[in-house]
Amino acid sequence: MKKHILFFLVMIFSFGIVVAQDEETPKPKKKKDRPVTEMFGSGILIDEQTSVIAEKKTLEMMIQHRFGLIKDNGAKDLWGVYAPSANTRMGLNYSITNNLMVGYGITRKNMYSDFQVKYNVLNQTRKNTIPLSVTLYGNMAIDGRNESVFTTSTADSAYKFSNRLSYFAQVLVSRKFNDWFSFGINGSFTHYNSVKADTANIKGMNHDVIGIGFMGRFKFSPQSSIVFHYSIPLELKNMSENTVVTNIPKSNFGIGYRVATATHSFEVFITASNGIIAQDNYMHNTSDWTDGEFRIGFNITRLWGF
């Protein structure tokens, strides 16, 4: 009888030890590779879109401003601060999901009303399971000036509402290399339904522009960064509609300082173009940064979560 009791007790304690060991050594769970944060600190970098989209149900208010050319009048207009050619855009963006944003803005120049959408196809992850972010951006703008502006000397000079429309589409590939450096390159297509022309298909502006660009951020403190961008409209002869192309757009370069928190971003910079919406910069920039034609500008963003 004692042998049976002893055997029973040994079995109970053995079972308890095995159960305890199973409870103490659970199988490790695989950690999900999450997207990187703070790649650029804002959805806009001077004149360029970035891969940043605020988390879903976030409303973003944006104010963008460009003063006049610094070199035109010097101290007479405070190096462009009081120049009459200043330009401003005010806009609102809303993140429907973590990867999808829609927005609307209105710009002083040409009274553009623009409707935009941005979508992250891929997000770079912290363990480099996905090494790059790939972003699609597009907008449509409506020129709000008087209809007389759209009368041309071309064969079809009658005013139509569609003459006011312009479009921009862009693919952006970017990467956060480390905590202090992020870099992105992009390719874009710009189309204006109506452009200035002297003689149809002989002398005038082209309706379409292909562009490439790049941008970067050097972060040197928890809130502060140096940012830069360079965008280049390409002159492609096989895309030209005219024998003589007029008002050929110039490249755009900008460099500045940014301070950003979780809900705010402020940039102050110098840039060449006085346009703010992308298609205006790629189609109508006449300022030559290599000749010192810069202007002071700033961007302000503010986020609200709902």
Image (cartoon, rainbow, N blue to C red):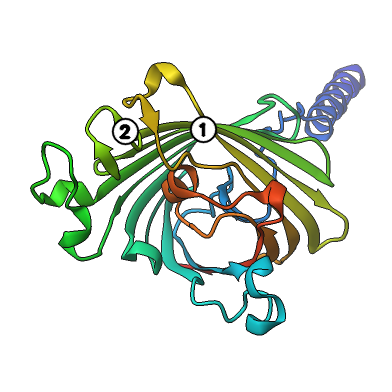
Residue 281 on image: x %, y %: 49, 49
Residue 137 lies in what quarter of the image?
A: top left
Say which residue label 2 marks.
203
Q: Which quadrant is home to the C terminus?
A: bottom left
Say which residue label 1 marks.
211
Q: Is residue 82 left or right of residue 190?
A: right
**How far is mark 2 from mark 1, CA to CA?**
22 Å
How many numbered circles does the render carry? 2
Residue 35 lies in what quarter of the image?
A: top right
Residue 290 on image: x %, y %: 71, 46
Q: Is residue 115 left or right of residue 276?
A: left
**Amino acid carrying mark 2 in the image:** Lys
Q: For residue 70, say whether it is visible.
A: yes
The label shown at residue 107 is none
- Say which residue appears at 8% left-offset and 47% top-offset: 158
Query: Seen from this angle, which residue lies furthest left?
Result: 158
**Amino acid carrying mark 1 in the image:** Gly
SS class of the residue under badge 1? Answer: strand
Q: Residues within 10 Å of mark 2 (few under 14, many from 20)?
A: some
- Say which residue appears at 81% left-offset and 62% top-offset: 224
Residue 144 lies in what quarter of the image?
A: bottom left
- Say which residue appears at 75% left-offset and 41% top-offset: 182
Q: Is residue 21 left or right of residue 215?
A: right
Q: Residues within 10 Å of mark 1 (few under 14, many from 20)?
A: many
| First reached walking from the N terminus: tag 2 or tag 1 | 2
